[in-house]
Amino acid sequence: MKEFQLKYGCNPNQKPSRIFMADGSDLPIEILNGRPGYINFLDAFNSWQLVKELKESTGMVCATSFKHVSPTSASVGKKLSDRLKKACFVDDIEGLDDSPLACAYARARGTDRMSSFGDWIALSDECDEVTANIIKREVSDGIIAPGYSPKALEILKSKKKGGYNIVKIDKDYKPDPIERKQVFGVTFEQGRNEFKIDADLLKNIVTKNKDLPDAAKTDLIVSLITLKYTQSNSVCFAADGQAIGVGAGQQSRIHCTRLAGNKADLWHLRQSDKVLGLQFAENVSRPDKNNIIDIYLSDECEDVLGDDVWKQYFAVRPEPFTKEEQRAYLSKITGVSLGSDAFFPFSDNIERARKSGVSYIAQPGGSVRDDLVIEACDKYGMVMAFTGMRLFHH
């Protein structure tokens, strides 16, 4: 296939629209089902790069969930605890523990379920039946993977009344080292960002504490590779082999850190006894449960707990999860990793990171205030590595 005609571009008025290879060669994909759109393909090609690179760096199968050209999360294929399975709504998935790929997507989708609603999925390996069974019941726009088992393909083709977007990519495809795009009729050209992210990047530890465990190295690699394909400015919190909070596309770095930290906090809070013990009303759908939990944990909790409304959402009226209780719960969290796509200009980012249990940090360094950032890390016994490499993505 030399080109594929799209219904329209970013918006319905932007016609004509297509994808094609500038050198006239075949596209490196097969469209097995559906009719993906312009933004679908932006998500597809960015998300595929992320999982391909993450697998190459960690040696583990992985998955990501994308929305509007940024990942909501990415994860390697580690088994989930019973508590995390319930928090990710996959505690009833048969065979989950036997499929690392399914575990990876369950984690990626379960991290920020509000943002992942209607996601684009990328898998590093052939989609199996267990992974397809998770995807089958989620609201999703499409998927890209290097292959699909016959049963997985059958399951996925049944989504969206047969219209679910399924793309197969040539896993051996390597793009031209020079990339180009146009803005306002002007062509921009640059070398592809082929910078390799692995454990060697984390050797320049600048803090007094230099104890960086292997698990934290993996989490920092997950964080940095996630950032490489996230709209800048961006910050990413990671734990247990997955991104747990992505702060994307903010003009201020502290706003990135606050956004990502708040999302990481919600990921932790969703695994608390109070949230896992919520008893929903019988007619509440899976997407509605996400919304209800989000409100329950927010300052607007009375919108779902009030005398006149709670019966719409719950079979049993829950006790509020007060801010004091939430802070006490989060204060016990440690061992979280944090990556940043550019240097921290002020130590306020470290202060905010500490509140979300951050113990390990990787960032380029190079700020005129590096000494103050290092001092803040030392105050809390954090380990911070300077990578020397910015990861802006636009």
Image: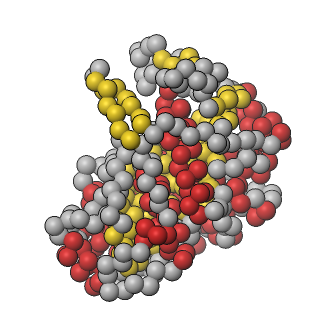
Q: Which residue corresponds to the image point at 64% horizontal and 21% vertical from the top-left?
A: 1
Residue 126 makes an appearance in the image: yes
Image coords of residue 226 (percent x, y): 47, 55
Image coords of residue 22 (percent x, y): 49, 23
Q: Is residue 226 left or right of residue 125?
A: left
Q: Indicate the quadrant containing the C terminus: top left, top right, bottom left or bottom right.
A: top left
**Rendered position, 11 above or below 207:** above
Q: Is residue 296 left or right of residue 255?
A: right
**Rendered position, 333 above or below 3:** below
Quadrant housing residue 61: bottom right
Closest to the observer: 215 or 312? 215
Closest to the observer: 220 or 337? 220
**Rendered position, 78 above or below 327:** above
Q: Which residue corresponds to the image point at 49% horizontal and 69% vertical from the top-left?
A: 199
The figure's colour scheme reads secondary structure
Q: Which residue corresponds to the image point at 64% horizontal and 48% vertical from the top-left?
A: 123
